[in-house]
Image (tube, helix red, strand yellow):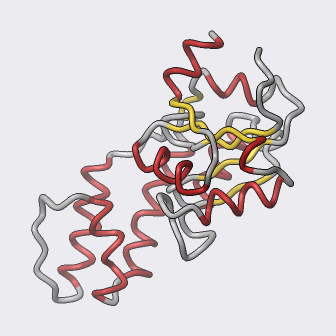
Amino acid sequence: MSHEFEARVYDLDGTLVRLDVDWQEAASDVVAVYEDAGHDVDPDRDLWSLVNEAGRYAVQDEVEAVLSEHERAGAEASEALPLADEVDSTRDPIGVCSLNCEDAVEIALEKHGLDRYVNSLVGRDTLREQKPDPTPLLTALDQIGATPVSTVFIGDSATDEQAAERAGIPFQWVEDRVQQHY
């Protein structure tokens, strides 16, 4: 295994584990929160745009509660992905920076025995800022005592890649990492 970096930060869902979440059902439940508050919402809107706009409609806490409930249940039923083996095979500082709620990240890491290897955890609700803003990623680095040039961020989405670019951190797609090491 290559040690070109001194520290690693991983995304969670789709990178280390696969949360068992029915995202369409979660989106429907979020639409229901808007509707219960008297707001007409296109039921086919993207879940993440609804989450990001919740504060504008004064439903942020309710949306967060509904989405987090889905994610916690999905974390309890999650499955480990190949890179989970990489986490428990290193002594390098490890962080997790996720758009999932912090509770769900903790549940998934504990379920798969990865919590003892993770030195930093930043979830969607840890800070006000969220990926692709670089702040969550830089916070994870600060917590593990790493610098952007000595760290790689491994993820599975354009949001992950954008966050890494904005933070000045090398990025690696999970598929590339798996092919390189397994």
Residue 168, compared with residue 103, is above or below; it is above
Q: Which residue is drawn at 56% across and 52% down?
A: 98
Furthest-top residue in this view: 182
Q: How many labels does the image show?
A: 0
Residue 78, compared with residue 140, is above or below; it is above
Towards the viewer: 105 or 180: 180
Q: Residue at x 69, y 34 (%)?
A: 112
Towards the viewer: 159 or 44: 159
Towards the viewer: 4 or 49: 4
Quarter-wise, where is residue 63 in the image?
A: bottom left
Q: Quadrant of the C terminus?
A: top right
Quarter-wise, where is residue 15 in the image?
A: top right
The reply, left or right, for residue 110 in relation to residue 180 is: right
Percent position of residue 52, x then y = 35, 71
Q: In which quarter of the image is the N terminus?
A: top right
Residue 172, compared with residue 179, is above or below; it is below
Furthest-right residue in this view: 91
Towards the viewer: 115 or 55: 55
The reply, left or right, for residue 112 in relation to residue 160 is: right
Q: Which residue is drawn at 82% across and 23% down?
A: 89
Residue 179, compared with residue 104, is above or below; it is above
Percent position of residue 78, x then y = 53, 37
Quarter-wise, where is residue 11 in the image?
A: top right
Percent position of residue 133, x then y = 51, 64
The reply, left or right, for residue 48 in relation to residue 168 is: left
Q: Which residue is drawn at 73% across and 44% down?
A: 149
Percent position of residue 102, x then y = 62, 61
The reply, left or right, for residue 105 in relation to residue 14 is: right
